[in-house]
Amino acid sequence: MNVFLCQMPPFFFLLFIVAYAVAASSEKREVMFSWNIILGCLVSWSYFLLLRIFDEHKDYLIDCENHPQRVLQRGLITLKHLKIVGAGCIALQLFGSMAIDGGIGGTTLAWVFLFIWTCLMGKEFFIGQWLNQYLTWYAISHMLVMPLIIWWLANIAVPGVTLSIPMQILMLLSFTAGFIFEITRKFKGPDEDRKEVPTYSSIYGIKTVFIVLVVLISVMLLIQLWLIMATIGNLPFLSLISLVIFYILSLYQLRSFLRHPCVRNRKRNEAIVGLYMAVGYLVCAITIFTAINV
């Protein structure tokens, strides 16, 4: 998931915007442009960049063996360079959170909890050998960071926001969406599967993973609809149609991969499912903002 997020800047902007929309609606705040929005987009981007940096350190030796062609493994950049960038990301997030609070408050504490979980992820919760044998538990433990991200971003957008029902639904949506993309990313065909790099398809079989993804993507659609209903009290027809169209496209592409599990279709899986995630957040944000401004 981190690769996708770091290569698509609009995605982490959308993550902040939808957190802002839900938080503003829940607290009945007026929606207006402010420096909080700029800061929120910047820190959201910096956090996912930090996640990527943590991953590069954690997987460096493995990637040297399995992916020697990558920029870091070729020596074009070094781990020291990444540490400097990572320190800058941490400073931006910490001081940005403190600026929102005017000291240490809810936003800063939300970031502290998020950062602690991030550090535990970087160390694979000190049970890395076990986690790498059980990909499902690995994904769950790492995707639990998504609700923490949403809570932190919501506090940046609307300081003092409460943990309302819509906010809890958005947290659930972020976890589900992240989990889906993580599975999709490791859903490969026989020509890509290697014993030294376990994937969901190599462990559970292509058909089983396909069924799991169909169920999870269907659940994600229901959560998206639930979020809109819980936040604004109704479900606009255009929002429903937009979500359903990309839902169908995702299932169609996954079905294509099941029939022809090749590299090209695997890349299309990531692109279509990733696009559905982004469109889903965008539709939710636009729908909620529109209702607020009426």
Image (cartoon, helix red, strand yellow):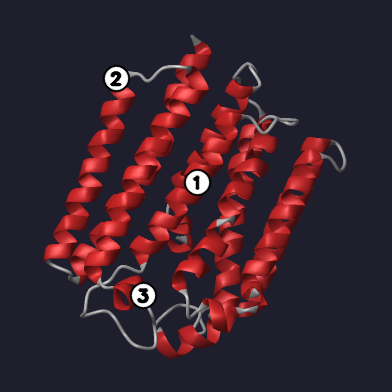
**Which badge, 1 or 2, comes first in the chain's sequence?**
1
Residue furthest top as drawn: 294
Mark 3 and mark 2 residues within 8 Å of each other at the beta carbon: no
Q: CA distance from mark 1 to mark 2?
A: 23 Å
List the residue tagged with mark 3.
199
What residue sits 75% from the left and 41% below the top? 107
Q: Secondary structure at mark 1?
A: helix
Q: Which amino acid, by three-letter code, is at mark 3?
A: Thr
Image quarter of residue 264: bottom left
Foreground residue among 120 and 72:
120
Nearest the eye: 208 or 96: 208
Residue 82 visible in the displayed image? no
The N terminus, quarter of image: bottom left
**Mark 1 crowd level (few <14, some 14–19, many ≥20, 10 Å Cα):** many
Q: Are marks 1 and 2 in contact (CB under 8 Å)?
A: no
Tag of residue 237: 2
Which of the two labelled residues, at mark 3 and mark 2, occupies the earlier sequence position?
Answer: 3
The CA span between labels 3 and 2 is 38 Å
Label 3 neighbour load within 10 Å: few <14, some 14-19, many 20+: many
In-image side of 25 versus 217 (left or right) = right
Judged from this view, the residue extending furthest toward the right is 103
* Residue found at x 37% / y 44%: 219
**Left or right side of 193 for 256:** left
Tag 2 secondary structure: helix
Expressed as whole percent of the image width and height from the top left, the position of residue 27 reads 66, 21
Residue at 43 percent across and 79 percent down: it is 70
| Disc 2 residue crowd, few under 14, some 14–19, many 20+, Cα 10 Å | few
Asked whether residue 253 is in view, the answer is: yes
The residue that label 1 is drawn on is: 174
The quarter of the displayed image where residue 162 is located = top right
**Foreground pick, 2 / 224:** 224
